[in-house]
């Protein structure tokens, strides 16, 4: 690959280093007793990963540019190949930047929630999770993808369970996630096995060629179905989302912030990769799956999960259900099987990371100051913590899709894509789901802002530390700035969709 | 009918194991038994891979040193495919890690809740939520 910003020697190995740095640095982070040092190690590794992701992102901006990296010098298709195009480059950049912002927020939040002796282990597990997600996003080898998926998942179970000091339900939530996540991953391996048996290769680009040449084969189609169900579990595709609400509601605040912005997105990427690149979305089998499986489930998820969110009193669980609904929007874009639809889905993926990042960070700030999570307790927050509440409000309005926020942009493009495909009923579903979102967001915003002064005395809050205020401010501003000046994000999403539809791993 | 099953005996065994595992995960309320079911389910997939590696009449993929150096490997030599074994070694490690993580969680759940039965756990969780008013 052509070096862009970094020295050539570093740029040449960027795809490997991106994953290896956080993975290797998790070991020293675990060995150091001091939580602050472990935090610094985590910040530096994620920052390094972010810089490398930016380098890769710049290198893949040219039309149809693909970076292929032979791990250990073993040439593909026999060795493990890391293959990055505009689609996963965008995802890697998103992973790095949200990971970095979330880590800044982690400093005070983790110090508040995790026992002193466990903090370095916590950061170590986080680094493993981050490395796993980056690995899934950059590898071009099906089995390697499974291994990274499990690396990230096992680390995720651990860091979710660490919320048990605040609420013991974190333990049961984590266990349920472990059982469902493992079933999902095993389904994925079965699918990979079927494809390997028929094509004789694990390299995804190689598989794509072999499958295209086969012109319809039952075993391969069964493999695709297994992969769709397995990864659908990880992506919280309705109705496979049962693990998500409790996991997000009881995990430490930092973990929820990080997972809500990255974990389901990476799984969503795997579905795109398989349905558009390894398989062709134009073959009858896959396009049937898109129209008859993905799209109805996406719409059901948008409506049902939004409705379930209405009845939650725990704010974090409310937003967890809303996340399931948002996955529905992304899946709807994917299900349209057009370049426009996929671009809208990718756009919503990026934008949703911004809004949920801002929302969960603001919730973390509230929890840090008052230790609250019920909607009733939010009364009077507008007076007690006006700036944090304002940032929260921006995120919430963006979630609804108010104009001049990123939420509006992604819904606008999604509706446009649906109309282009002639799917007026999908437009109706998007609008209905948005109206439901107005209601659940309205409940919280009213509690925060409209309670008369003096009715609830909150007492002076703990000052929100700068380490929370800065990333929260950045995300809230991003929601507004990219809501007005949307071109950069839209062009990234378009390039990503084009890479998936017109090229991607298929040479 | 008998022949069809006999020809695919390995796959039939794998299928039975797979269903036994999945059923155990879904049907039992005991968290340890649930982990056992999960392990059986994963193991059946290991067998699926290993079964595909077998080539009729093939031996292990170990080449004679002299044949390798002088390039005199007989053309009709049949070897089993070693790649699935390597993959499954990795998958076993992943399975062990998952099992360890799951059992560690069960131990902690037992310490904190005093039970590992799913129905009792959800009752306690429900009571917790009512107490906190969420």
Image (tube, helix red, strand yellow):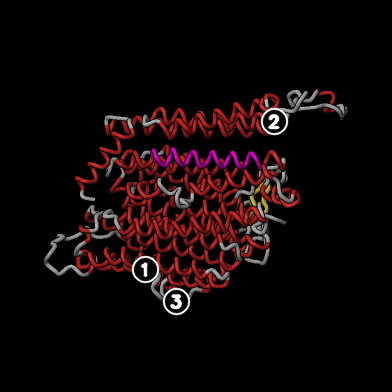
Q: Residue A156: x and y, percent?
A: 43, 44
- The answer to the question of whether label 1 and label 3 lie on touching residues, with beta carbons closer than 8 A, is no
Q: Residue at x 33, y 57 (%)?
A: A309
Q: Chain of mark 1?
A: A
Q: Quadrant of the N terminus of chain A?
A: bottom right
What residue span does the magenta drawing correspond to? A175-195
Pick whichever, A241 or B3, lies toward us: B3
Q: Quadrant of the C terminus of chain A?
A: bottom right
Q: Mark yes or no: residue B76 visible.
A: yes
Q: Residue at x 20, y 70 (%)?
A: A450
SS at circle 1: helix
Spatial CA span between label 2 and label 3:
57 Å
* The quarter of the displayed image where residue A388 is located: bottom left
Q: Residue A107: x and y, percent?
A: 35, 52
Label 2 Cα neighbours within 10 Å, binned few <14 / some 14-19 / many ≥20: some
* The quarter of the displayed image where residue A141 is located: top right
Q: Is residue A232 magenta?
A: no
Q: Is residue A175 above or below residue A260?
A: above
What residue does disc 2 label?
Answer: B53
């Amino acid at each position: 690959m052509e070096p862009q910003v970094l020295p050539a020697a570093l740029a040449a190995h960027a795809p490997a280093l991106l994953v290896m740095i956080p993975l290797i640095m998790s070991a020293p982070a675990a060995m150091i007793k001091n939580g602050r040092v472990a935090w610094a190690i985590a910040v530096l590794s994620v920052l390094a990963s972010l810089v490398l992701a930016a380098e890769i992102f710049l290198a893949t901006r040219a039309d149809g540019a693909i970076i292929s990296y032979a791990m250990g010098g073993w040439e593909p298709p026999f060795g493990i190949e890391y293959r990055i195009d505009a689609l996963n480059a965008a995802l890697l950049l998103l992973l790095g930047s949200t990971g970095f912002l979330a880590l800044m927020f982690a400093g005070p939040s983790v110090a508040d929630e995790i026992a002193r002796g466990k903090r370095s282990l916590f950061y170590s597990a986080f680094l493993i999770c981050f490395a796993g997600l980056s690995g899934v996003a950059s590898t071009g080898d099906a089995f390697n993808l499974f291994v990274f998926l499990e690396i990230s998942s096992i680390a995720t179970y651990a860091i979710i369970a660490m919320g048990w000091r605040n609420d013991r339900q974190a333990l049961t939530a984590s266990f349920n996630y472990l059982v469902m996540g493992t079933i999902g991953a095993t389904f994925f391996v079965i699918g990979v096995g079927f494809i390997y048996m028929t094509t004789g290769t694990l390299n995804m680009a190689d598989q794509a060629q072999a499958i295209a040449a086969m012109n319809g084969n039952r075993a391969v189609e069964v493999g695709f179905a297994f992969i769709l169900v397995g990864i659908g579990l990880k992506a919280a595709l309705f109705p496979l989302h049962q693990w998500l609400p409790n996991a997000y509601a009881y995990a430490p605040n930092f973990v929820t912030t990080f997972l809500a912005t990255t974990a389901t997105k990476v799984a969503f990427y795997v579905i795109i990769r398989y349905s558009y690149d390894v398989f062709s979305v134009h073959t009858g089998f896959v396009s049937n799956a898109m129209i008859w499986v993905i799209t109805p489930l996406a719409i059901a998820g948008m409506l049902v999960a939004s409705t379930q969110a209405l009845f939650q009193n725990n704010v974090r669980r409310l937003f967890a259900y809303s996340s399931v609904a948002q996955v529905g929007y992304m899946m709807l874009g994917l299900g349209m099987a057009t370049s426009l639809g996929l671009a809208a889905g990718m756009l919503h993926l990026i934008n949703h990371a911004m809004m949920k990042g801002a929302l969960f960070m603001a919730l973390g700030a509230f929890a840090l100051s008052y230790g609250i999570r019920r909607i009733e307790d939010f009364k009077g927050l507008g007076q007690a913590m006006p700036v944090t509440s304002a940032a929260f409000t921006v995120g919430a309005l963006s979630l609804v899709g108010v104009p001049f926020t990123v939420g509006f942009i992604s819904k606008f493009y999604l509706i446009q894509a649906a109309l282009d495909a002639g799917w007026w009923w999908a437009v109706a579903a998007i609008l209905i789901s948005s109206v439901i979102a107005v209601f659940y967001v309205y409940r919280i915003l009213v509690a925060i802002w409209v309670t008369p002064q003096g009715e609830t005395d909150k007492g002076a809050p703990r000052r929100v530390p700068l380490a929370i205020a800065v990333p929260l401010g950045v995300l809230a501003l991003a929601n507004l700035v990219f809501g007005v000046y949307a071109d950069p994000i839209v062009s990234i999403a378009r390039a990503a969709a084009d890479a998936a539809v017109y090229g991607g791993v298929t040479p | 009918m008998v022949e069809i099953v006999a020809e695919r005996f390995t796959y039939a065994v794998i299928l039975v194991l797979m269903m036994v595992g999945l059923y155990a995960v879904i049907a039992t309320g005991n968290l340890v038994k649930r982990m056992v079911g999960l392990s059986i389910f994963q193991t059946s997939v290991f067998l699926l891979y290993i079964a595909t590696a077998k080539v009729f009449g093939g031996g292990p993929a170990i080449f004679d040193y002299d044949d390798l150096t002088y390039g005199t490997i007989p053309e009709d030599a049949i070897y089993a495919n070693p790649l699935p074994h390597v993959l499954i070694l990795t998958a076993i490690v992943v399975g062990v890690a998952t099992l360890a993580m799951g059992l560690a969680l069960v131990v902690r759940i037992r310490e904190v809740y005093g039970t590992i039965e799913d129905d009792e756990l959800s009752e306690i969780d429900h009571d917790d939520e009512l107490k906190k008013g969420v």
